[in-house]
Image (spheres, rainbow, N blue to C red):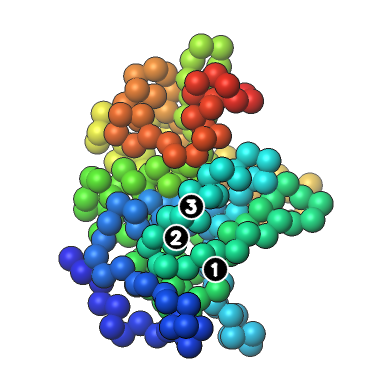
Amino acid sequence: MKFNVTTIQKSKNDEQRGLILPIEPSEELAEFLGILTGDGYMNHYPYQGKYLIEIAGDSRSDKEYFVEVSNLISTLFGLKPTVRYLKGQNTMNLRMMSKGMFNFLLLCGFKRGRKEQIGIPLWIKEEERYMNAFLRGLADTDFSFHWRRDYPIISGGLKSQVLMVAVAEYLRSKGFAVAGPYKETTKDLRGYKDSVKYRMALNGHKNLERWMGSIGFRNKRHLRKIDGDGEI
């Protein structure tokens, strides 16, 4: 399989900055799409002429990881994202403004805007090594790890039921014991629409051993907790 990048529209700024568009699938690209699916967002603002791709993180615990994500983006696309810190919040964003990158990610199967029904691109689902890389990126950004006494738990909650069902089915097919996904509704006391997430968990040492052997984490926030050196 190859991506037909010859029809993708770029901006003059893309050309000047040396934007690269991958022509073949790779584990690195699959992992990047997992990162975007977890804590990423992209949209087009036609009145401003902006094509925005952004990844959110915690400024207290994700700085090291964002260096790795920034390097991954540079390797894949030849662009260096900017880092923004939000005043009064413990939030940092990696931001990329690129028409060509935006259109390429649409071609790869990533959806713009809200992610309630986002799924996994078919080219990733059809290849085990791409699925494992995708799940690593997803878990690094939007899953958590903690110990309950001496019992390890990997858990995640996402708005997309389609995505969580696909993740759970894949993990079960690889021998994981998966709890969920189950629907969790959080009431909004201000009168706005209630928040709905679909949660799943991988409990126990066998699941952790299997995860680290085939998928793993790149985010040191998770790795420190596994080693017992991070906050629980």
Mark drawn on residue 96 = 1
199 above or below 6?
above
Query: Can residue 104 be seen in this snapshot?
Result: yes
163 above or below 154?
below
Quadrant assignment, res 82: bottom right
Q: Earlier in the sequence, mark 1 or mark 2?
A: 2
Q: Quadrant of the C terminus?
A: top right
Give the residue type that dot 1 points to: Met
Task: Identify which residue is drawn at 50% across, 21% down.
Answer: 227
Classify mark 3: helix, strand or loop: helix
For marks 3 and 2, give the CA distance: 6 Å
Task: Report the side of 25 relative to 150 (left or right).
Answer: left
Q: Are marks 3 and 2 in contact (CB under 8 Å)?
A: yes
For marks 1 and 2, give the CA distance: 10 Å
Q: Are marks 1 and 2 in contact (CB under 8 Å)?
A: yes
Q: Quadrant of the N terminus?
A: bottom left
Image location of residue 40, percent across then percent down:
53, 58
Q: Residues within 10 Å of mark 2 (few under 14, many from 20)?
A: some
Identify the residue position indicated by label 2 in the image. 73
Identify the residue position indicated by label 3 in the image. 69
Task: Identify which residue is drawn at 30% across, 29% down.
Answer: 213
Quadrant assignment, res 75: bottom left
